Amino acid sequence: MASHFCKVLFFIFFSKRVNFGYFDENREITIEFALDFCAISHYNDYDIKIGGTGELGELIAVLSGKGGTGKTSVCAGICTALAMDGCSVLAIDCDMGLQNLDISLGMSECGALSFVDVSEGGYDLSQAAKHPQFEKLSFLTAPINRSAESIDLEAFHKMIRQARKCFDYVFLDAPAGIDAGFELAARYAQRIVLVTGADPGAVRDAARAGQKLELMGQTNVRLVVNRVNKRLFSSMATTVDDIMDQTGLPLIGVVPEDHNVILSAAVQIPLLSYSKRSGAVRALRSIAKRIEGENVPLSMK
Ligand SMILES: Nc1ncnc2c1ncn2[C@@H]1O[C@H](COP(=O)(O)OP(=O)(O)OP(=O)(O)O)[C@@H](O)[C@H]1O
Ligand SMILES: [Mg+2]
């Protein structure tokens, strides 16, 4: 018990050192974690992630303004890249009614539980579907017959906090638009990945999404410019710099137009298994490394 007590003190101390921008939230969770920990007589590494660092996992929402910019493809690509790097990842589809993250992950045959089955239905996070190839990757789909407005926020938040104790990264793939589904995904996130295309409509909607996130108090927002086609860029006389200027957001990655994204989804194989070295794969693996904190230079051509 004495050693448990020391570990509890360590966690409370450590909570002051992690994710400074989200100090209060993390401290609340870490203290709760410490108390949970106290109640456990036989500590089990498998049930509660310590990950060697004592940090809670990070919740990352993948959002856009305009629909069809590539949120789901980018979310699946980053999740598989992180799992390939040895991180434990939970991918959650928040696109209720139109869910298709399972396809991009190559998990449509897995019979996955929905996140509402866990948050409101009494299932355990350990029952989330496991990826057949990437053992560190788990998945919860979106419920079919529910609207974002009908989700029990308290239960959702509780599930997310539990997930952050069990996984290094928890990803939420948001629906298009900036209404209730957007808010559900963004509300508790530590980091936002905002995906845009280069067309004026997508860029303007990304700027609006960025403004809405600011109003929600979300400042850790990074842009992914997806489907970049150099030739199209030069005929449109636009650059990634212009898109950053117009949205007012810093960049975390540029993903090229790559037919492998469409082909891999068509055969329901994860992009990173389908093509090891295509342009999109290299870009998504670099984004994953940046999320892990590595300094991978950005190519902004
Ligand atoms: N880098 C890319 N290169 C080529 N095609 C891509 C790329 N990224 C996404 N796509 C294709 O664009 C289409 C839309 O992608 P996706 O479903 O990921 O977008 P989304 O933002 O999640 O859409 P929604 O708003 O409907 O949820 C898909 O057909 C996908 O295969
Ligand atoms: Mg989608």
Image: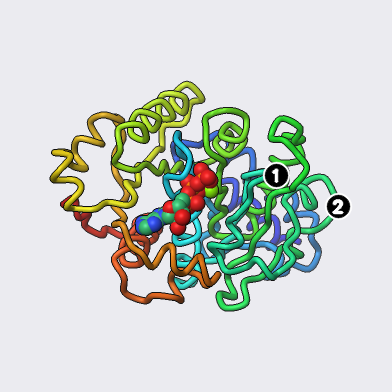
Depth-wise, is mark 1 or mark 2 nearer the camera? 2
Q: Relative to residue 162, is residue 124 drawn left or right?
A: right
Q: Amino acid at mark 1?
A: Glu
Under circle 2, the secondary element is: loop
**Disc marking residue 32:** 1
Residue 140 in the image, given as x and y percentages of width and height: 68, 57
Residue 287 vs 225, above or below: the answer is below
Q: Amino acid at mark 2?
A: Gly
* The image quarter in which residue 2 lies: bottom right
Q: Residues within 10 Å of mark 1 (few under 14, many from 20)?
A: some
Q: Name the residue furthest top.
A: 215
Residue 192 in the image, given as x and y percentages of width and height: 45, 41
Q: Residues within 10 Å of mark 2 (few under 14, many from 20)?
A: few
Residue 245 in the image, given as x and y percentages of width and height: 22, 31
Residue 78 visible, this orientation:
yes
Residue at 65% across, 66% down: 108
Quadrant into which the N terminus falls: bottom right
List the residue tagged with mark 2.
122
Residue at 50% across, 65% down: 265
